Amino acid sequence: MSPRAPRRGNGPGSNLKPLRPITTGARLALGAAFFVLFFAAWAAATFGGLVSKTFLADPVTMLREGHALFTQHGFAKDVALTVWRVLGGFLIAAVVAVPLGIAMGAWKPVEAFFEPFVSFSRYLPASAFIPLLILWAGIGEAQKLALIFIGAFFPMVLMIAVKVGATRRDLVEAAYTLGCSDWGIVRRVLVPAAAPEIAEILRTVMGWAWTYVIVAELIGSERGIGHMITDSQALLNTGQIIFGIIVIGVIGLISDYAFKAANQRLFRWAA
């Protein structure tokens, strides 16, 4: 008697096979379902009295406080200022880190020169530089942009260097066989091969930049989302604190999806 072949039924577990893709509609539905369950649990905990509203505002109070922030306290200016700081610090870091990372990945002497310092620096917490940055640049915009730069630059450089250095050697050898020059190898092989991964690195580091800007705004700032959160904490207004955190998450989610869409259009060969 021959052994029974494994069944490929359409039961409940058939869609949970490892690495099996799902449709876009299913992905959106599952993502939305999580948020629905999250807010339902939050409402049950606060309206049901399981958590004191002094320490955790309910969703309705949070929305009411958020409306007051925009209509009465000029919160739109805080949001715009924080977004500008994130983009400014991130772009400055990317303009320097991308070419340096490519150079470190492509040329080993460059990597040997920079890699020890970059590896050392990426372990230093960016927030530890705040006292020095305040001494050097005050509490203005330069201090906040510098903090974001420090937090984003060093890990960005190292990750880009690793991706460029991991380019398939057969592609490099094939390009040399076809008569490509050393600079042509970098421009026509290494950079195009690593470009999709570099874009994903930038998308990841952009999320880190939001952490650094909020830390910078918590200390020595007169405007911004972080400043609003600090003021709300002093007043025990958890509704405004939660609303500020959610605004950061929404902006981050939008920028993340924008990065993904741009990457898919720019690097179709990596899809």
Image (cartoon, rainbow, N blue to C red):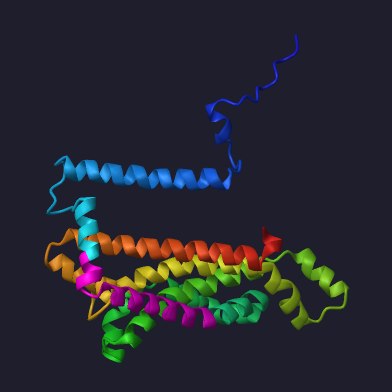
**Which residue shows up at 88% across the image and 74% down it?**
178
Q: Position of residue 100 (x, y in %)?
A: 58, 81
Residue 83 drawn above or below residue 261 = below
Asked whether residue 125 appears in the rendered view, the answer is no
Check the picture and name the quadrant holding the C terminus.
bottom right
Residue 163 drawn above or below residue 221 = above
Q: Nearer the viewer, residue 107 or 98?
A: 98
List the single residue furthest toward the top: 1
Asked whether residue 40 appears in the rendered view, the answer is yes
Quarter of image, res 121: bottom left
Q: Position of residue 65 (x, y in %)?
A: 20, 62
**Which residue shows up at 47% across the image and 83% down it?**
92
Residue 253 is left or right of residue 56, and the answer is right
Q: Position of residue 64 (x, y in %)?
A: 21, 59
Q: Position of residue 107 (x, y in %)?
A: 67, 79
List the single residue furthest toward the right: 178
Any magenta on residue 69? yes
List the single residue furthest toward the front: 71
Name the main secondary structure of what is drawn in magenta. Answer: helix
Q: Nearer the viewer, residue 261 or 123?
A: 261
Number of numbered markers:
0
Quarter of image, res 267: bottom right
Q: Nearer the viewer, residue 50 or 109?
A: 50
Q: Nearer the viewer, residue 174 or 234?
A: 234
**Which residue shows up at 58% across the image and 68% down it?**
199
Residue 126 is left or right of residue 45, and the answer is right
Quarter of image, res 142: bottom left
**Which residue shows up at 40% across the image and 65% down it?**
251
Residue 92 is left or right of residue 130, and the answer is right
Magenta-tinted stretch: 68-96
Any magenta on residue 112? no
Check the picture and name the quadrant holding the N terminus.
top right
